[in-house]
Amino acid sequence: MNRASNLCKLSYGIFIMLVMASSCLNAQHKDRTFARPEYPVSMWYSTGDALFEYKWMPMDSEATVNAAFDILQSRYNVDRILWRDANIEWVAKWDKPRDRSFYGDSVVEWINIARTSRAPELAALAAKQRGMKFWGIFHMFDYGGKAETDAGAGIGQWHTYDPWLIQYPEYCVWDRAHITFMTGMIEYGYPQVRKEYLRRMEEMFKGPFKKYDGLFVYTYMENTVAHYTDEFIYSDIACDQYKKMYGVDPRKEPFDLEKYYAIRGEYITQYLRELRPLFKKYGKKLAIVLNSDKLDLPQCWIGGGSDILHQGRVKMDWRTWVKEGLVDELHVWGGVSPKKKIENVQEVLKVTKGTPVQVTVFYSQEFPASAQYLYAEGVQRLITTDSHNEEGGMEKRPVSDIDSADPDAVLNVLTQARKKELDLPTEKIAALLRHPHPFVRRQAANTIGTLKLQAGVPSLEQAVVADPEESVRAMMIDALGKVNGPNSVQAIAQAYITMPRWPVRIAARGALAAMGPERYPDLAKALDNQSSVFRAVLMESFHQRETVREMLPTILKGLNDSDEQVRWEAVFSLSVYPCQEAVDALLKVLDDKSDYVQNRAATSLKIMLPKASDELRQRVFDKLMVKYQEFGPGSKRTDKDWGWRPIGDAIRDGFGTKGKNALIDILNGKNTELAKLTWKVLFLRNDQQWHPVERNVMEKQYKYYPGRSDRQACPPAVLD
């Protein structure tokens, strides 16, 4: 797996759903005995993740929404949809996407799809027509991030931010030495915070949230910024209250974390008390997701592969919420064994007994016989969507059903064909590329690609440029990556140029990357395409594949492209070519007219330096040091808020002791502004990977922060 692929796995949204889907309906589809659930279920549908996972059941147009809802209701007995677009509707109204960010592009595209396709409104209507409930998925925390977050991965700045929190950082949570803060986590103890977010929620209920029957609120956060669970937990209001109650200042003296977290948990409860009348006023329900391992804590981001809690172990006092009637539903999340989940459900049921609060649980299979009684207790299962939902395979069908008027029957036959359980003429499958049902067209393309039916390529090439659905084009492009001909690259180019949407882009980069040596000349020629959006995705495809020496001249040519995005993609594609020629070319790119391209070059050089000659390594080191100095006082760089991180990381990681000593010299120098950034480079790693650090180790490093000698005696916190 190359480095670029690893970066993409941590995309905005995709992280959590990939983990959930792995334990969900896949097993059911492998088993022919799968039956429609007897009891209705809820389904989490992540519209954002579907941007990346274009193979998942799409719901981005009237045709795909209705097709999906029919399947979910008839096959899976879904009576409630949990719709992820509630998050993006909030972002569209209150947050700002940042330019020059890989995932920022996806957020902008997500917003555009929601607006232009009207998918949220169409989904709400489809649910109503079928008697299904329609809820929005929302967050309790996770309100954007600082520009520098994840910038060390070379993907640009963090994708979104809340301007209000940037203006008022005192309402965020800080580290103990008050050096830096996390914008995604707000402190609900401030009356100003509750007032502002209550105002926003009412505006949403009047507008975008009007269509939702309720909000399903998760409590995890999606980034890798924290180094240990209790790093970003300090606010003036909480610390001052603790000192007033216990005579100890948590910022300077040993203190009891449990008592501190109880204070912060009360802030959340107070926010819910103030929210409750608003929900009732607009007739909305509220569900909150509990940590399935420890019910009294916020959720871990299970897609991140770490048990670090960005939020800290703030007390989620769900028992008080039940007692005071502040919630309508409590949900037991995934991430633990089925046995543990059942035990947690039983505990929550005991507390909610005699109240109107419903209990739900993420549970992909039917409850075991020993837990069947939970249905009678009103417990509902939550499942999630995946790539198999739209396929057939529920039952065996005769070959003749390929001509059936029932789309579900056709999908079943296509599934059997892909599994080589029956034979179908290629012309029959190709004819389905023009079928009126979008899922049939998608799965017909999938079948041609999976079975590598060369005779179906001309039909695919014709269909891909004419289909009105981006999700169908994406699947057709995917198929052309598996089986293709001399006209396929041009067909993909035309399909993407005329519909340059995110799912089509992701499919195109994967398909172009999958093509074999016979297509290399076509790929090289395609860089002359007049469309910069296609040249960019073509260049992007080169860092999705293993090193192909024949493609190096094409990538080097991309470094001189007139379009900034093409050059940016070319720079990162070179990172999989660890040769002197590539390193020398990237050294020149450090003088590119775009700061954005420069810092991408720094990341690629960091990857490639182990293969460079000593002479070339010295030249790169000297150049990076010059570039790093540009982030000092009065910096004119367009990336001054975040570009120092990828360049600083390249110095730190690319040159061993020499690089670290150079940064330490800057840390101890007179340039205080640059020294503060350097302290973060050395001690606050943040590059889309987890960098766990023990609390006592991190707090000892505070003394090295420029101008903070007063923090040298800062004692560690204690957790009783």
Image (cartoon, rainbow, N blue to C red):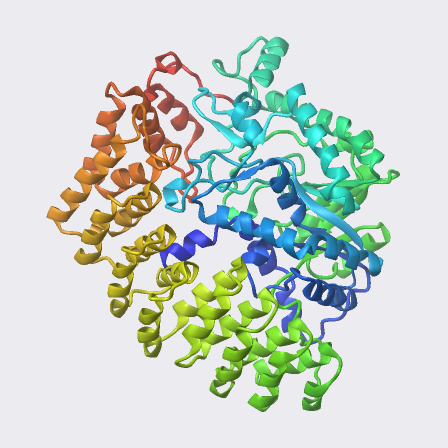
Residue closer to the observer: 400 or 350: 400
Which residue is depicted at the point 62% across and 13% down?
Answer: 241
**Is 234 rendered above or below residue 284?**
above
Which residue is depicted at the point 67% across and 75% down?
Answer: 392
Residue closer to the observer: 336 or 409: 409
**Is 190 rendered above or below residue 16?**
above
Q: Which image quadrant is residue 425 in? A: bottom right
Residue 258, given in percent of the width and then of the height, sits at: 60, 24
Residue closer to the observer: 697 or 75: 75
> The N terminus lies in which quarter of the figure?
bottom left
Residue 35, given in percent of the width and then of the height, sits at: 75, 71
**Is 404 rendered above or below residue 177?**
below
**Is 140 rendered above or below residue 418?**
above
Residue 455, given in percent of the width and then of the height, sits at: 49, 88
Query: Residue reaching furthest right?
Result: 354
- With 85 as the anchor, is 595 left or right in this view? left
Residue 421 in sight from this viewpoint: no
Q: Which image quadrant is residue 552 in? A: bottom left
Residue 434 in sight from this viewpoint: yes
- With 108 as the anchor, is 676 left or right in this view? left
Residue 658, given in percent of the width and then of the height, sits at: 18, 36
Which residue is depicted at the point 77% across and 32% down?
Answer: 321
Residue closer to the observer: 290 or 495: 495
